[in-house]
Structures are given as C-alpha cells and as structure tokens.
Amino acid sequence: MLRTILLGAGIFAALLSILIFSGKIPLGNAKDKPVGEVVLWGTVDEVQMNTIVQEFNPQAKTYQVRYTEIPATQFSQKLLEALANGTGPDMIIVPHQLILANQTRLYPFPIGSLSEKKYKDLYVDGASVLFTPSGALALPVSIDPLVLFYNRTLFSKHGIVNPPQYWDELVNMVPLLTILDSRGQFVESAISLGAPNTPYAKEILMATVQQLGQTPVLKQYQEDGQSYLSVTANTPVTQDGEVFPLATAARFFTQFSDPTKNTYTWSQYGGNAEDQFVAEKVAMYIGRASELATLRARNPKADVEMSYLPQTRGYNTFSTTGQMYAIGTLKTSKNLVTSLTIEGEFAGAGVSPAIASLMGTVPALRAYSSTEGLSDVIARSMLVAKPWYDSFPIESVTLVSTMLADIISGRAGAADAAADFVSRLQDLYTPL
C-alpha cells in the first residue's frame, strides 16, 4: 500500500511539473493542484461503478468524480452530441474499441510522465494498442482474455482426459464429442464454432491470425508524423510456404459448420451457444474469462473448467485476444489536471483492481499476473492477450459475419471472402 501511495505521488508530481512548464498550468494558480469535480462517462454498470466512486471521493478530499453510464451502442453518438453542445464529460472509461473510435477527442497521457518503456513495463502487452508517439490515448484499467471453457463430465464420458492445447487437437476431438440423431440433428456437439452466430467469431478469427504471425490492422507513421492504418489480416506470412492468415483462419473456422465434413459440430440454427453449453449439450465454448462464474452459476451441476485458447501448432507464438477497458481524458475537459490525476489513479494499483473485480475481470497491470491464488490460465492469458486495432467494432462484426456466410453458403471461397473483408475494412480506415 505504501509503495502504491508513493508511486502515485511521484507520478502526480512529475505530471504536474510537466503541465506547469509546458504552459498548460500557470504558476501560482489554484489549479496547480487537483481540485473540483470531474464528470466521467462510461459503459460500466452505474450502480457498480458508483460503489468505487463513493469510496474514492472521500479519500481524494479536494476533488471528486461524478459517474454516468451510457450504453455502449449509443456511446460515441451521445459523446459527439454532448461535445457539440458543450455538455460533454471530462473523462471516459470504455472498452478499448471505443477509445480508438474516439481517439481524436482524447488528450494523451503526457509521455514525459509515462514513457513508452514505463508504460509497457506497467501494463500487459495488449495495452500497446493504445500507445502513440504523443503518449497513451488512455490508461488500461482491466483485461478480459479469451479462453476455452470445457465440460469435464462430457470429456470423461467420451474418454478425453485433457482440453486441447492446439487447434489440430480440437479437430481430432470433434468426432468423439459430437453425436447426431437419425435425422442429422445434434444430440451433443463438441464446440460452438464455425457459423456466423458463433460467439466471439471475430475475436477467434483475429486471435488465430495473430497466432499465424500477423497483425490484423497495422498502424504506421509517415515521416511527418501522420499516421495511417493498413488492414494486414490477410497479408502473407512465410512458415513452410506462403500462408494467407485470414483466409487460412476462415477456412479452418468454417469447417465446423460444414455438414459434409467429419468436423461438423455446429449449425447457425443451433440456438444460443452459451445456453447449449450450460445445458451440457456442447462440450466446449470459447468466451471471455469473466464468464466463468456466470457459467457455473447457471448450472451448478455442470463441471465447467477453463483452459487456454487453443494455439496454432508449428508457430513460435502463444497468444489470445481480449476485451480491455481503459480510462482517458478528453481534450475538452474543463479540469485537465484533476482529470489526468484521476486517470492515473483509476488505472493504478490502488483503484483498478476494484474496478476490474466488479466486472469479473482482472487489472491490466502486468504485475497482477503474479498475484497469489490467481488462476494459471488467467495469469498467462492476460499477459499475452492482444486486442487488435478495431476502431469500427460494430461494422467489423458485420463484415466478419458476411465473410463467414459467403464461405458457408458457397458464394465465395475462403480466399475471395477474406480478400473482400480486407478491402471493405480498409475502406473504413481510409479517410475520404
């Protein structure tokens, strides 16, 4: 605790001096110290978040936070409207995709206070998606890695001892765990995978792309410092021959919904995957680590366990993806010093564990992975969970669904469907 307090004081002192000498804060002004109220908007449940705020405000003494929840689907539009009429918040706490979508409105955390090396030393690898040459767009608060859930009872019933470590092992398990009746309907399925209605289909595909050694979207900088984005999800990599990552991942993914193959184990008409898993009709389910408690609570009789997301054999990678929440300060904040101070505190060891806990996730702090009693699966997965540069999250879900539907229906092969996805996503990332 003492170390945390001293660290926080040191960061604030460095931040304050930088703001003073940069001219952001005039010397001798009362605003040299964090005072007053700041308004924080976010997608975190308001009742839960206010339990954090109510504990934080009395300890802050000279400043405080007022929190408002905004639905994720409406967040960017409501933020735009509020900023246009001068009623916007000082800060936001949202998933990383919404940070990226609103990055032009954010005041980067001063790089003089938190250098790239210090930032990377402090936060998990996936936090790099938020760092720019000007500093962090926002500071990470929590990480929720993608993992594999499995039903130990169904595994034992079919003579399977351990969950798959690699995708090819999962393929070999499918015929053992999938049972069809005389009409070709599923009695039991190995895994909810392969169709457009697969939960987290986009995340699974992009995690596989990363396992194949490619970055789904690459942010690059020109000599003048201007940035541009390239959709590289299907840019070839060489591993015993040329591999097109997205096409390869999509071809692999869709085989599980093809009735003509012995890997057939899921249908787009198979109902809700989570419900089927909880009902013990599906042996494996890929989801976020935070879902474990809910899955167990929904069916206490089911022996649900968690393992790492399967990896791609033969590649020198070990990775998954995940949902990351971050807190950022808006350029239009009427109380910049206080906002940046709170940003640092909410993303630090003093507050972020409490925020993460209420969401069922873990802090994005690298050091948290060594916490005694933390699940080995979460400890390792949080370190290697790499969210990709998905600044059009709603549109990209639609594009993935279209790609998968085109492959499954036979309208396009995996190569053409992947190429179409890249082209359409690139159009979104290319300014008019």
Image (cartoon, rainbow, N blue to C red):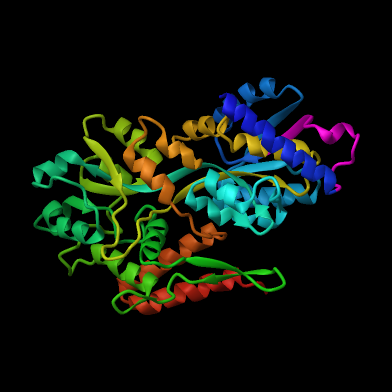
Q: Position of residue 306 (x, y in %)?
A: 29, 41
- Is residue 338 found left or right of 280 in the rendered image? right
Q: Is residue 339 above or below residue 170?
A: above
Q: Position of residue 42 (x, y in %)?
A: 61, 40
- Is residue 14 found left or right of 201 in the rendered image? right
- Whether residue 11 is in magenta: the answer is no
Q: Is residue 431 above or below residue 188?
A: below
Instruction: Choose top left, top right, bottom left or bottom right for residue 26.
Output: top right
Residue 156 appearing in the image: yes
Residue at 41%, 74% (x, y): give it. Answer: 418
Query: Number of callouts in the render?
Result: 0
Q: Is residue 236 above or below residue 345?
A: below
* Residue extent of the magenta highlight: 23-40
- Is residue 118 found left or right of 293 in the rendered image? right
Q: Quadrant of the N terminus?
A: top right
Residue at 57%, 29% (x, y): give it. Answer: 350
Q: Quadrant of the C terminus?
A: bottom right
- Is residue 239 found left or right of 176 in the rendered image? right
Q: Position of residue 260 (x, y in %)?
A: 17, 70
Farthest top residue in view: 58
Residue at 30%, 43% (x, y): give it. Answer: 275
Q: In this rendered view, identify the residue nearer to me: 130 or 101.
A: 130
- Whether residue 36 is in magenta: the answer is yes
Residue at 11%, 42% (x, y): give it. Answer: 156
Q: Position of residue 20 (x, y in %)?
A: 83, 43
